Image (cartoon, rainbow, N blue to C red):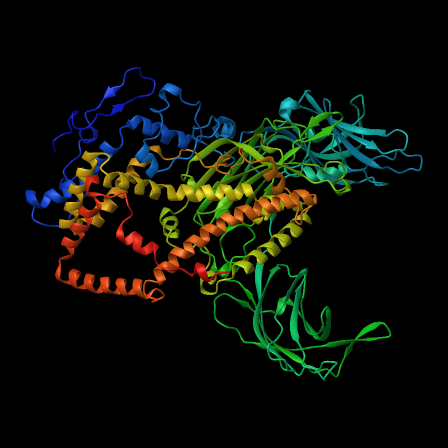
Amino acid sequence: TRPVTPGRVKSYEYEVRHEKSATTERGFCAQKNLPSPHSASFPSSTPRRSSTLFSAFPSLSLFLLPLFLLATKSRKTLREFAVCSTAEASGYSSSPPRERSARRHRCPSKIGDMMQRPPFRTEEYSLKETAPRLGGVAAGDKLTTTYDLVEQMQYLYVRVVKAKDLPNKDITGSCDPYVEVKMGNYKGTTRHFEKKNNPEWNQVFAFSKERIQSSVVEVVVKDKDLVKDDFIGRVVFDLNEVPKRVPPDSPLAPQWYRLEDRHGHKGKGELMLAVWMGTQADEAFPEAWHSDAASVPGDGLASIRSKVYLTPKLWYLRVNIIEAQDLIPHDRTRFPEVYVKAMLGNQVLRTRVSASRTLNPMWNEDLMFVAAEPFEEHLVLSVEDRVAPGKDEVLGRTIISLHHIPRRLDHKLLNSQWFNLEKHVMVDGEQKKETKFSSRIHLRICLEGGYHVLDESTHYSSDLRPTAKPLWKPSIGILELGILTAQGLVPMKTKDGRGTTDAYCVAKYGQKWVRTRTIIDSFTPKWNEQYTWEVYDPCTVITIGVFDNCHLNGGEKANGARDTRIGKVRIRLSTLETDRVYTHAYPLIVLTPAGVKKMGEVQLAVRFTCSSLLNMMHLYSQPLLPKMHYVHPLTVIQVDNLRRQATNIVSTRLSRAEPPLRKEIVEYMLDVDSHMWSMRKSKANFFRIMGVLSPLIAVAKWFDQICHWRNPLTTILIHILFVILVLYPELILPTIFLYLFLIGVWYYRWRPRQPPHMDTRLSHAETAHPDELDEEFDTFPTSRPPDIVRMRYDRLRSVAGRIQTVVGDLATQGERLQSLLSWRDPRATALFVTFCFIAAIVLYVTPFRVVVFLAGLYTLRHPRFRHKMPSVPLNFFRRLPARTDSML
């Protein structure tokens, strides 16, 4: 292949970072030294034929001509394009380009239009790569322990099991013992027992090695008294003699120690203890009392411990109400207006009023509920007659236990059943059953196991499995998350006249929720806790949230206190490379009524391990949701209502755990309010759509420049390429797919090296107007003054008016297309029908290649053969009638 000379095509400058001189390349084709399409190193896009020069020319031309087009339509350097791509992969640009070189550092206009790059993000909200010492070794070294995604933290553990033969100290001759574990300035205390000489505590105390200020640990047994507690005895350990334990070693067995007095003499009574040095991987770590939480009262300790939660198993309950028979209304002189009301817990649904206004009404209507195991509520069905507006009469009621309802795994219909309706009457103020009532209702009820109960948005769902376990597919891998530390947290509340933060993390993936322990009064908390999940689908998202604990002083006694959100991070598993450890500091960004705010950073270590690459690749060809969602799909309204009910059930169940995972935490993690109206989100979604359509718009603009001969050389090459495609149409599809392959391989060099995170520019959080943010944080229904509501309503009407105009214009164009053959305008339809008849004859006698060739030449004709006035087909189309003149 003859290289392109500098006189014909301007040469590329290939700028290399950290080098002062730039190397000049001879041209794109010469630089790449492109091989022949029939060489062994390059896949051929032509069908198998004789290897003559003539047969190789079309394929060779189809390969080289677009490269020439690429060289002529973009005079920017490859290095500039690489800078733009690398900036997108890194998530931000360190500094804006200088004014004199701004034009050189932009993405190439044509290529950039084809592949739109998002705007650079500021460094404040960017992702930062870190290098923690995971597992006790530097990041990147070989990790040997199973607890290898966190930094090891050394702790001194003291397990106080029980005591025996304690002497009596009170005047009454009894003993109320408790134990103090003291190390330097830190002191932990067990609960005390009244009048018990052989108490059992079985409590664990953990002292951070970083805060140890003493060489000994002292375990003291005391007798609780009203005035001053009496000393019973103690056991002292030298830290240099404390053994070390590394899991998975078995727990250290506790031993009996004789109590000593203050002078070291043996006394009466023994204490069973176990003392060892360990890490946060120890199984005693979650339940232990920690020295950094010494200021938390005893009734608040439960709210600071780390816990693992499992959400209840959720089912869709389908109630198909078919008909009722032998109803007995009070007023038999009128036709009854009967409907069925179904209740499950706080979920209430109603059927429509039966169209057959008889004593044997029919509905054949489905009602859908969300039920959670273990089933605590009963299904209550009542048949009611609408006697008057706002007044209903109960004709009968039945109560059904969910334990006896059959479970369906597929779309096959189950047998229906008849249930007797019991009528309740009031006798002397008491409700009694009427035994002579024989009405009944025909139902088909089942628990749907083939659906996935949606409790979060499908856009960032963490679990897509059906409810029934027999339908689960085997897992494809393991997700491991190390929650390391946070940096630069802002004060969330005031205590003793100064700002403070008591931070903890919550991670949610699938049915498993985890909560780290709360680090008291620290803007740089260190958790270093590691958790593991099974992965069944790579196209899922794990959510990590950071919160401030506001329930340290007595848990539920904190009147109306709500844990404050600090920030949230989402990580999509499909964006992670397998078996790679990602260690990054994620910005914690929240949107407040005052604007977007960075609350700090959280450092995470994430690893996705795939057990079978073939199974994971196979999942990309499978439906995202279970089969029942496509065989018997739910309506959009049903999905929205069921999701809201599922979220309420999950938040209620988790808030009853100990320590509770409170409702505000669950709702924030599940994005309960994501469906609420927001002007900011609407604008962000609009610009997302424009970003998707911008490549098509760029192609249209580029083609318009080709048609108007803005660059004669490019237009000539397009003519040559067009002639080749007309002569050899069988090469069109192979060439398209070949170039898609080459583009994908080319962009592999600039693939993102970091997982995506919250983008303030994409969300339009930085440019949102204060009034828009105030509207977004308004309650529903609104609590703002009438004048503000009126202003927002007028603004919404203005925006809706523009949308209405656009929708009307789209409808007008569609109606004009319909009017081509509708004879609404008889002259226009006659012209179009005549044209179609003549075109059919001409196209029948003229070869198709000739028609395409002439149409292409006409489209690409020179501007001197063009007119500034609209074309004849466009004029004809614009004159077609629409139905706008029939609208009021």
Q: Compared to 49, does 165 lie above or below? A: above
The residue sitting at the right extreme is: 171
Task: Tell me the quadrant of the picture where the N terminus can be found.
Answer: top left
Q: Compared to 635, does 867 lie above or below? A: above
Q: Nearer the viewer, residue 511 or 644?
A: 644
Residue 690 in the image: x percent, y percent? 42, 42
Q: Is residue 871 left or right of residue 192?
A: left
Q: Is residue 161 left or right of residue 13?
A: right
Residue 126 in the image: x percent, y percent? 49, 30
Q: Compared to 638, does 119 lie above or below? A: above
Q: Is residue 396 left or right of residue 720?
A: right
Q: Quadrant of residue 351?
A: bottom right
Q: Nearer the viewer, residue 655 or 241?
A: 655
Residue 137 in the image: x percent, y percent? 48, 26
Q: Quadrant of residue 701?
A: top left
Residue 225 visible to an observer of this rendering: yes
Task: Identify the residue shown where x is 34% and y is 44%.
Answer: 696
Task: Identify the residue shown where x is 75% and y is 34%.
Answer: 271
Residue 666 in the image: x percent, y percent? 62, 46
Q: How many marks?
A: 0
